[in-house]
């Protein structure tokens, strides 16, 4: 339902966004390491909290396999800081208020919501290798169980 769809083997679009503390974070800062970049609709909503807490609970195994986790939403940095503090999140949360990075990754567009076509965030996860190339592009993922499935696909034990 959206025009942009990134495929494995393509370079991940570069970006610089503010994190939960208002600091600029660039994707290029993570070259040389692997990245799990996930897009979610809104901080502190039930599904997004479930997904974020699943990443938090899996951070040791993901980091042990060389992955840095970054979450991206349209929320402002202050709300992201509140989300981090409320739920003990131990990875970077990035603010993309105009959805420009969402659009670059195909994580923004038309979707079905309760039987209606609406425009918004398409919950998506991307795995990037050390050179910044996409190795997995997962669109329309479910909040519940997604992280466990991702760990299995990456060959990481919980």
Image (spheres, helix red, strand yellow):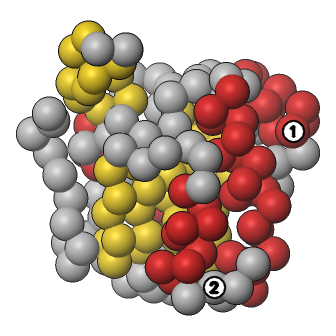
Quarter location, residue 11: bottom left
Does residue 115 appear left or right of residue 50 in this picture? left
Tag of residue 87: 1
* Residue 131 screen position, x and y as percent: 38, 83
Does residue 26 appear left or right of residue 44 in this picture? left
Q: Compared with residue 131, is residue 101 higher up or lower down, i.e. above or below?
A: above
Q: Compared with residue 116, is residue 90 higher up or lower down, i.e. above or below?
A: below
Does residue 110 appear left or right of residue 58 in this picture? left
Quick one: SS at disc 2? loop
- Seen at 30% across and 32% down, the residue is 108
Q: Residues within 10 Å of mark 1 (few under 14, many from 20)?
A: some
* Residue 23 screen position, x and y as percent: 68, 43
Which residue lies under the disc numbered 2? 156
Q: Residues within 10 Å of mark 2 (few under 14, many from 20)?
A: some
Quick one: SS at disc 1? helix
- Seen at 48% across and 79% down, the residue is 153
Label located before the other in sequence (1 or 2): 1
Residue situated in front as seen by the camera: 124 or 31: 124
């Amino acid at each position: 339902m959206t025009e942009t769809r990134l495929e494995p083997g393509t370079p991940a679009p570069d970006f610089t966004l503010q994190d939960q503390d208002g600091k600029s974070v660039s994707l290029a800062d993570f070259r040389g390491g692997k990245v799990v970049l996930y897009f979610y609709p809104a901080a502190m909503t039930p599904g997004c909290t479930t997904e974020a807490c699943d990443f938090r609970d899996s951070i040791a195994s993901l980091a042990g396999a060389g992955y840095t986790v970054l979450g991206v939403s349209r929320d402002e940095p202050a709300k992201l800081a509140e989300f981090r503090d409320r739920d003990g999140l131990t990875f970077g949360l990035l603010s993309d208020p105009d959805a420009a990075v969402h659009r670059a990754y195909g994580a923004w567009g038309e979707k079905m919501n309760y039987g209606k076509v609406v425009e918004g965030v398409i919950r998506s996860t991307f795995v990037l290798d050390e050179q910044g190339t996409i190795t997995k592009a997962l669109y329309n993922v479910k909040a519940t169980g997604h992280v466990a499935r991702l760990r299995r696909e990456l060959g990481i034990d919980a």
